[in-house]
């Protein structure tokens, strides 16, 4: 806990000191992990909802910790974001995901139609080198720009600064597609969406969760699908776990989805059967 001294200086606080040390240690561990390539990218299939056919993947980072084993991103992304390490880490994920898509495409002609979605954190988005890095990765890996989807958060759009619009437009000019992640959680006005060159809305899992039991969530999900249709944006529902949620979303007209019902995020070498398999209906 912070304690302010009489004249505004911080008073030494042992608990706070321990926090700072712990954070410095965690930061160092993250840096080491990046250097030693302890991160891995898993891929979650995104499917066409009516046909359940694979249309692409979302790249999701994990930390293969030498002692703790596989650690999920929610435990280290916030620290990476706070320390700025998300910039090199995010660049690594993007590079990895594009190389993986290029490798699958080289090996399997079926993979040529698939797209790759990669998360961009706010800090990465504000980093001045972003557009050049994305351009470089597209060029080096040979992934067609139109196959790459960058997922940004709704809160980032809500800031609505000149710089945000400029960066989005520069990314669009490269030919990549933009998705708004966790859509519906930001309490933003909907009209702002028209001002940004986005292509895809991702309906947050919290709405999908209650979609069959809670009519409020169903109404929200329906509103997002409608909005997508009006603005000619694709809609992707996340966190689909049950057949009921799947059919409800299908009836609402949501085009795409991802969730444990279809597949969990898996390591790259487990993806092949999914690419090759025909839809199961
Ligand atoms: P997100 O972007 O909303 O990603 C979807 C999360 O929902 C993933 O969690 C995924 O595993 C999980 N999920 C997918 N289907 C289901 C389902 O049916 N049920 C449930 N309960 N969960 C499902 P994950 O992999 O733990 O990632 C959590 C968050 O960490 C992501 O949320 C994203 O915000 C962040 N993240 C992950 N990878 C990256 C990355 O490379 N860069 C950045 N900046 N953030 C990342
Ligand atoms: Ca996402
Ligand atoms: Ca999401
Ligand atoms: Ca979410």
Image: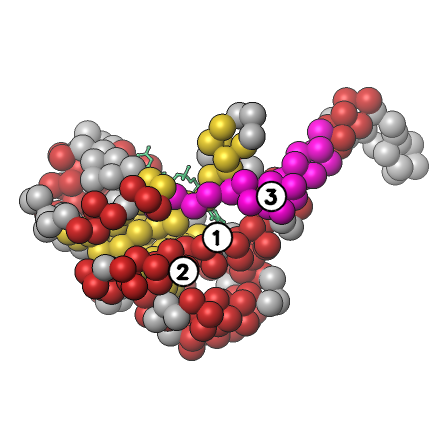
Q: Is residue 200 visible?
A: no
Q: Is mark 1 on a helix, strand or loop?
A: helix
Residue corresponding to mark 1: 93
Name the residue at 56% across, 69% down: 163
User: Between 205 and 133, which is closer to the camera in this rendering?
Assistant: 133
Mark drawn on residue 36: 3
Q: Is residue 133 above or below residue 274?
A: below
Mark drawn on residue 98: 2
Q: Quadrant of residue 228?
A: bottom left
Q: Is residue 247 above or below residue 165?
A: above
Q: Earlier in the sequence, mark 3 or mark 2?
A: 3
Nearer to us of marks 3 and 1 is: 3
Q: How crowded is mark 2: few (under 14 residues within 10 Å), some or many (20 or more)?
A: many
On-image quarter of the N terminus: top right
Q: Distance between the residues labelled 3 and 2?
A: 20 Å
Whether residue 197 appears in magenta in the rendering, the answer is no
Q: Which of marks 3 and 1 is nearer the N terminus?
A: 3
Main SS of the magenta part reads helix
């Amino acid at each position: 806990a912070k304690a302010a001294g009489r004249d505004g200086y911080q008073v030494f606080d042992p608990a706070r000191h321990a926090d700072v040390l712990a954070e410095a240690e965690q930061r160092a561990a993250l840096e080491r992990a990046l250097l030693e390539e302890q991160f891995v990218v898993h891929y979650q299939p995104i499917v066409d909802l009516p046909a359940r056919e694979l249309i692409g993947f979302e790249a999701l980072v994990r930390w293969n910790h030498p002692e703790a084993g596989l650690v999920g991103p929610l435990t280290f992304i916030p620290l990476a974001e706070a320390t700025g390490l998300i910039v090199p880490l995010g660049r690594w994920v993007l590079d990895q995901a594009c190389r993986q898509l290029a490798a699958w495409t080289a090996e399997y002609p079926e993979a040529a139609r698939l797209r790759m979605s990669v998360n961009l954190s706010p800090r990465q988005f504000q980093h001045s080198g972003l557009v050049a890095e994305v351009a470089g990765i597209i060029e080096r890996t040979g992934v067609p720009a139109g196959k790459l989807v960058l997922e940004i958060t709704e809160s980032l759009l809500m800031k609505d600064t000149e710089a945000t619009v400029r960066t989005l437009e520069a990314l669009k000019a490269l030919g990549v597609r933009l998705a708004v992640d966790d859509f519906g959680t930001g309490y933003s006005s909907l009209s702002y969406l028209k001002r940004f060159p986005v292509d895809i809305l991702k309906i947050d899992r919290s709405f999908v969760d209650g979609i069959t039991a809670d009519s409020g969530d169903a109404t929200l999900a329906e509103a997002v699908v409608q909005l997508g249709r009006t603005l000619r944006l694709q809609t992707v529902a996340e966190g689909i776990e049950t057949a009921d949620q799947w059919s409800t979303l299908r009836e609402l007209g949501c085009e795409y989805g991802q969730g444990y019902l279809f597949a969990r995020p898996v390591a790259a070498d487990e993806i092949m059967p999914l690419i090759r398999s025909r839809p199961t209906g």
